[in-house]
């Protein structure tokens, strides 16, 4: 594993973190640092523990052992509910939970209150920011449209705008491209890249099974297998054939085209 010695305080610091459920260890001795300005992709097979690792970071799970510090606050010494307000999580489950008959703008604005439905009058500055984020997401002409009538890709783009409305310090994206066709996936990733460039202070954690989804703004990669970190470090040094075979199996090939990586099975 590759760790970088830096003077600034890490955004995420995990020291010897393990997670057990019903006597079975799922995450094993995780040591990981994420620093300001870094965007990470977390890759690995189904069941590797990727989502559980992020649930700990997002304050939804407590580790069985180890030390966790997120945004400069150590678990056990901070009220997790307050810390959670600085973290935005996007997953397919959230898309299903949101009331579908709201307008797109209402869905985005509900993120300001951390509720599923909009119940209160929203400050004008927040509405202006929501419209700016919808514009960056390519949805400026859809704000009055009913959320249920959007395409799958457009819904996911709206959820990014919603997640970024309160200017979180940490944005967690859990397999957000699942179910998208190639064109919708490109549009989604392009809108995500525009929003990240607009909000450079946000650190992104991006879970994916597909290397081609690791967009150029992703600076680092972590490989997880059976709850163990297999590799960790800068994207250009860690996305190697040796690491891909250790993470998946020997029957893979790694191809790079421009700044994109592709994993081929043979």
Image (cartoon, rainbow, N blue to C red):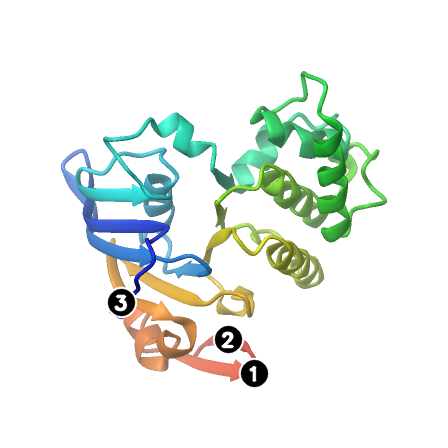
Q: Are marks 1 and 2 in contact (CB under 8 Å)?
A: yes
Q: Residue at x 56, y 83 (%)?
A: 257
Q: Residue at x 48, y 68 (%)?
A: 211
- Mark 1 or 2, which is nearer the eye? 1
- Mark 1 or 3, which is nearer the eye? 3
Q: Residue at x 57, y 54 (%)?
A: 177
Q: Residues within 10 Å of mark 1 (few under 14, many from 20)?
A: few
Residue 27, visible in the rendered structure:
yes
Give left or right: position of 100 versus 29: right
Residue carrying label 1: 257
The answer to which of marks 1 and 3 sits earlier in the sequence is 3
Of helix, strand and loop, which one carries label 3? loop
Vertical arrangement, residue 174 with respect to residue 258, above or below: above
The N terminus - image quarter: bottom left
Q: CA distance from mark 1 to mark 2?
A: 8 Å
The answer to which of marks 1 and 2 sits earlier in the sequence is 1
Residue 223, given in percent of the width and then of the height, sits at 33, 63
Residue 226, visible in the rendered structure:
no
**Of the pair 64 and 202, the residue shown nearer to us:** 202
Residue 21, given in percent of the width and then of the height, sits at 21, 36
Q: Residue at x 71, y 24 (%)?
A: 122
Give left or right: position of 226 versus 50: left
Residue carrying label 2: 262
* Circle number at residue 5: 3
**Of the pair 28 and 254, the residue shown nearer to us:** 28
């Amino acid at each position: 594993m590759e760790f970088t010695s830096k003077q600034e305080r890490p955004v995420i610091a995990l020291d010897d973190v393990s997670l057990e459920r019903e006597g079975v260890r799922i995450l094993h001795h995780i040591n990981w640092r994420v620093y300001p300005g870094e965007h990470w992709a977390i890759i690995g097979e189904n069941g590797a523990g990727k989502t559980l690792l992020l649930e700990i970071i997002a304050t939804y799970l407590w580790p069985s052992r180890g030390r966790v510090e997120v945004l400069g606050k150590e678990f056990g010494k901070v009220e997790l509910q307050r810390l959670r307000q600085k973290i935005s999580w996007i997953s397919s489950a959230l898309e299903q939970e949101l009331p579908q008959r709201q307008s797109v703008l209402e869905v985005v604005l509900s993120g300001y209150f951390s509720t599923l439905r909009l119940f209160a009058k929203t400050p004008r500055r927040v509405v202006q920011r929501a419209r700016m984020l919808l514009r960056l997401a390519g949805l400026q002409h859809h704000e009055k449209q009913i959320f249920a009538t959007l395409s799958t890709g457009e819904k996911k783009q709206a959820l990014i705008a919603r997640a970024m409305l309160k200017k979180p310090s940490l944005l967690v994206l859990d397999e957000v491209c699942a179910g998208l066709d190639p064109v919708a996936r490109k549009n989604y990733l392009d809108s995500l890249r525009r929003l990240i460039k607009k909000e450079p202070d946000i650190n992104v954690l991006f879970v994916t099974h597909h290397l081609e989804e690791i967009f150029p703004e992703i600076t680092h990669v972590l490989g997880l297998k059976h709850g163990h970190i297999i590799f960790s470090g800068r994207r250009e040094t860690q996305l190697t054939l040796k690491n891909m075979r250790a993470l998946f199996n020997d029957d893979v090939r790694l191809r790079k085209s421009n700044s994109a990586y592709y994993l081929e099975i043979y």
